[in-house]
Amino acid sequence: MSSPSQMNNLSHIPAELLSSIVKHVAKRDLYACALINKQFYMTANHVLWRALLVPNHAFAIKLMTCMHESPLSLGPLVQQLCFGYLVPNNTFMQFMINTPSLKKLTIHQAQSITDGTLQYLGPHCPHLTSLDLRNCQITQQSLHALGQYCHQLKEIHLEKCHDLDAGVFAALVSCPLENLVFASCTIHGLEDRLTMKAVVMDLAKFRDLKHLEIEHFNSDFVKQIIMHTNGWLRLTHLRLEFGTNIDDTDAIGFIKTHPLLEFFGLTDSQVTNETLDAIASFLPGIKEVNLTSTLNITHHGVRRLVRCSQGQLSSVTLAYCLLEAAGFPEAPRNSLETDVDGTEYVLFLGQKVINKIRR
């Protein structure tokens, strides 16, 4: 058994060393560490409270009780917060007020949170770097507050948010956005072509953008993005859905001006094998290609893409491209789909198939 003098020596461990030790301790053991002495207690709490997953309302109430009753100031320790349930507006407001150091916020069921509450997110949590909101009532006013206060905001994921207007990107132009995902959202005013172009021009101002996904928007908007955004020199990931008006000229022009692309996803488009050749020629780091519902490509073009790309390509998605399995004898059964008339079509080429095609 350790003597009292040996136990007291633990209190002389430098804070930097103790912090490094605690980082390598499993979370279930951190609670025991917190009982060793005051120094361990404070260090362990910094780790335990850094990232919180709130799975239900009962757990949320327990966390809030701890924040209010603990002799330590626990709220400022929280840097990541993820709600895994339909969080009530008042509950979210209490967390927002008590976590001023918050950097990453994720809420996938945000239906109950009002825009009036979200307008205070920026002022209360100015250190936000990542925001993921789905099924949310967020409007221009809240986005403007984020742009005004959150000057470190690099990631935004909005999904099924239907109260946005044409100033959505202009409101965030002061943020150094690198990762932007808009899925199944509604931006009012896009039916007007001049307004649509203005929205795209605002989007083009995010010069540091590395990751862009635009899903379930109208095809004219998607075409405008391809045609008028050639300044994302750091872009590595692009996913655009419903590109029904995009042809080879549009796609190849974009590919040539974004040579760092590693993921290229363009669904429902009019591109042909010419675009596949451009991917192989101008994207040396390409790793994944998604061409779902692209009907003007052939198995010859896909095989040429695989053979001519520069070694890093690991997957090609071809769902609903109607490319018959006979053109890809290397493809396993689990990557095929059988039509009602018995015709087999290839859905996906994985790394093993790609390696076989290259031999």
Image (cartoon, rainbow, N blue to C red):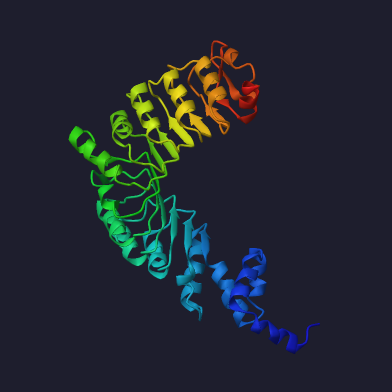
Q: Nearer the viewer, residue 201 or 321?
A: 201
Question: Residue at horizontal 30%, vertical 42%?
Answer: 204
Q: Position of residue 131 (x, y in %)?
A: 40, 54
In the figure, residue 335 lies in which quadrant?
A: top right
User: As displayed, is residue 107 above or below residue 246?
Assistant: below
Quarter of the image with the N terminus in it: bottom right
Q: Position of residue 222 (x, y in %)?
A: 32, 32
Q: Position of residue 146 (x, y in %)?
A: 31, 57
Q: Position of residue 233 (x, y in %)?
A: 38, 42
Quarter of the image with the C terminus in it: top right
Question: Residue at horizontal 38%, vertical 45%?
Answer: 209
Question: Residue at horizontal 47%, vertical 77%?
Answer: 73
Q: Nearer the viewer, residue 175 or 216?
A: 175
Q: Nearer the viewer, residue 97 or 252?
A: 252
User: As displayed, is residue 302 above or below residue 101?
Assistant: above
Q: Is residue 268 left or right of residue 16?
A: left
Question: Residue at horizontal 56%, vertical 12%?
Answer: 343
Q: Is residue 342 left or right of residue 179?
A: right
User: As displayed, is residue 49 above or below residue 189?
Assistant: below
